[in-house]
Each structure stands twice: as C-alpha cells, then as structure tokens.
Amino acid sequence: MDSAACMGQAIQSKFIVQWEDGRFTVESGKDAESFKKEFIEPKLNDIRQVEFDRRIQVESTKVSTSATVSDSWGLSMIKANSAYTQGIYGEGVKVAVVDAYVDVSHPQLANRIAINTGEIPNNGIDDDGNGVVDDYYGASFVSVPSSTTIPSPHGSHVAGIIAADSNYGPVKGVAPRAKIIPAQFIANDGGGSLGDAILALQYAAKRGAKIINASWGGAPCVASLRNAFKVLESQGILVIVASGNDARDIDVYPEFPASFNLSNQITVAASDFTDFMTSWSNSGFKFVHVAAPGEQILSTVPGASSMYMDGTSMAAPFVSGTAALLWSAKPTATAQQIKAAIEQSVDVTSGHEFKVKTRGRINIQKALQVLGQLVP
Ligand SMILES: [Ca+2]
Ligand SMILES: [Ca+2]
C-alpha cells in the first residue's frame, strides 16, 4: 500500500484492488492491517495491486451568464457541417460519459442513450450478468455522500455537446447519431472517489464504448487510475480528457488523468470564439494535445433545459463527438488512428498558436481527409 506517494484524503476503510486478470474491484475492510490479513493474504496470487481509495474533487462547474456569440459557434469553428454534408453523423458509435448524473429523460438526450438491451429495468435483478443491477440506460458508481440532492448539470451538459438531438431543442450535438453510455461517479456536489471513477471506466468498456469522455481531474494518487487507463489502451478504447481550468502548464505541474499521455488518450485545452486559448485553460506542449471550443457553450441540463457553460470540461466532448464522427466514417480505424487524424488536422493560426502539442484547434473537415489517407 503505497500511501507515502499519495497526498489525497484516503478512505481508510475502502481499497482499490486490481486483480491479475486486469479487473478492478473496490473492497471494504475495517482498516489496512485487517484488510491485509483477511482479504489480501489469502488471495495474494490473484492480486496485482492494492491501494487506498481516495476522495477526489472534480472540476468545478463554470456557468456563463450570457452568450455574445452564435449558439453553435463551436460547431462552425470546427467545421462540423462538412461531416453532415457527407452523411456522417456518428451512427453506430458509443461514447461513455464518465462524469456526474446524465438526465436520460431530457428531450434532447432521451433517444441518444445507448440502451443495454440485455437488462430489464427496475426489477432489482442484474439480468445480463454484467455485475450491475438494472443498468438499462447506464449506471451510477457514486459511493461518497453528497452535500446536495440537486443534480449537477455537468454530466448532462457534456452528453449534450457530444450527441444532443437538435430536433427536440436548441442544442446541437457534434455527433447527433452517436449513442451515450452514462457512467456516473461524480456526486451532485462535485465530489467523488478514485475507486468509483475506475469502476465507471471499467463499466463503460464492458458496455462497448469506443470513446470515453473524462471531463474531470484532480486525482491525487494515480497508480490505480493509470493502470485503469492502461487497460482501456489495451482494449482499443479512446479516452478524451479535459486539461483542467487552472491556467497551469501541466507538463510542469502534472494533473491526472490529463498528464498520463497514453497512446489512446487525447488531452484537450479550451479555445474561445476568437480562436485564442481561454485565459483559464491548462496547457502543455507535451501532455495537452489539441484545443477545442470551451467558452460560452450551450448544452443540455436537467429539467428539459439548456445552459451556457465554460470549461475544458466542455472542450473535451467536442473532441469526443469529433472522434465519434470519424469512427462512424471508418469503423475499422484504431484508437491511435483516430487520435492521429485529429492531431494531424488541427488549424494552426500564425500569431496565436496554442500552447499544446499540435499548436492547433481541431478541424473535422481536415480530420476526415487525414483519416481517409490513414485508413484507405
Ligand atoms: Ca446488468
Ligand atoms: Ca434488471
């Protein structure tokens, strides 16, 4: 138990266990000593790693008061229309929103949720045997108490940027025929735990997500989380991560999971409608890969409503939606090819290069062309 390297608040009675087959579970015990004796030692041959579960505080929500630009400035900036004119809408691609609550009854999201057809809802039984009871739409892994019962708008906002159906309201999703898998681990007050995050990531993979959107950060202790991301890498799943909103260089002051820099990971900074980096976006020439729209973004929120929000949390789902469009155009592409197509096609404008690896902001029109060359 590598507690010395971990500065976050340990949950003394919960332990993240990675098994030799790669799976993770979160187990309870009285304390570290008794957990070691009663749980770990008898199963030592099957266990790869154990660490304390920890509380994490995810990115805070930034609400914009008013919009001074077109509601769909982001889609215009990244040339999303070029995909739609070719009949590319993200059909057949599942994107997991590993985040806060997603309002699956929102009129603009209701028919965009990936239904788990093996599961019968509300009968108290895990019909499809995937370890989660009644996960007809998705699942919640929240185990930490929340200071409020009012749903956070964060998860629904992220989901709408990816796939909102504009036939039922003002929000236009980037990939309006992609399907969302809600996998909640962030409580209504923005708190969560590392173990719950890992369980949500693992669940998303099991449900068949090709893309996982991770608009959060702040993990203080990263061995288990990095291992969980490595498992996703081996499964061919692309993970899109928000760079964070602290105006920091995360090459110098790493932030996790944003700074993992794995081959299946795209970390995203936030651009504004003048196509400059926002003042608050994290950056980094090594660990942040691209910029995408992240200011005054209109998207869905609970209560059949919509709202403007700012954040790299909003920029990441622009890239998740873009990846869904690309993958629906070339279903045989690998996660690394989708990433390469997005990286190699950014717009770099002289005089305001972004402080990210590619120096640029995503462009769907060019990304589709590049992917066509990478995957003939
Ligand atoms: Ca189930
Ligand atoms: Ca059931």
Image: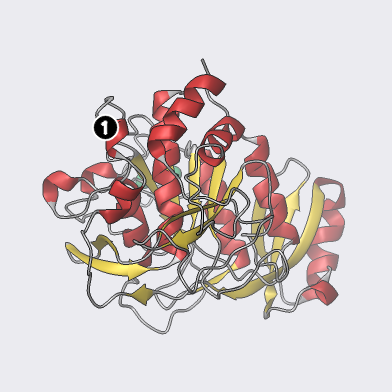
Q: Closest to the observer: 239 or 273?
A: 273
Left or right: residue 29 versus residue 194 is right
Residue that mark 1 sits on: 84
Q: Is mark 1 within 8 Å of ligand 1?
A: no
Residue at image x 61%, y 59%? 258
Residue 112: x, y in percent? 27, 43
Residue 111: x, y in percent? 22, 42
Question: Residue furthest toward the front?
Answer: 351
Question: Residue furthest toward the left?
Answer: 168
Residue 326: name its quadrant. top left
Q: Closest to the observer: 51 or 256?
A: 256
As displayed, is residue 211 above or below residue 195? above
Question: Residue furthest toward the top?
Answer: 376
As displayed, is residue 126 above or below residue 141? above
Residue at image x 47%, y 39%? 207
In this figure, what is the number of numbered marks?
1
- Colour scheme in use: secondary structure
Left or right: residue 206 versus residue 300 is right
Residue 178: x, y in percent? 34, 38
Residue 105: x, y in percent? 21, 55
As displayed, is residue 294 above or below residue 253? above
Residue at image x 59%, y 48%? 358
Q: Can residue 130 be seen in this view?
A: no
Q: Closest to the observer: 59 or 97?
A: 59
Q: Can residue 300 be seen in this view?
A: yes
Q: Quadrant of the N terminus?
A: bottom right
Amino acid type at mark 1:
Tyr
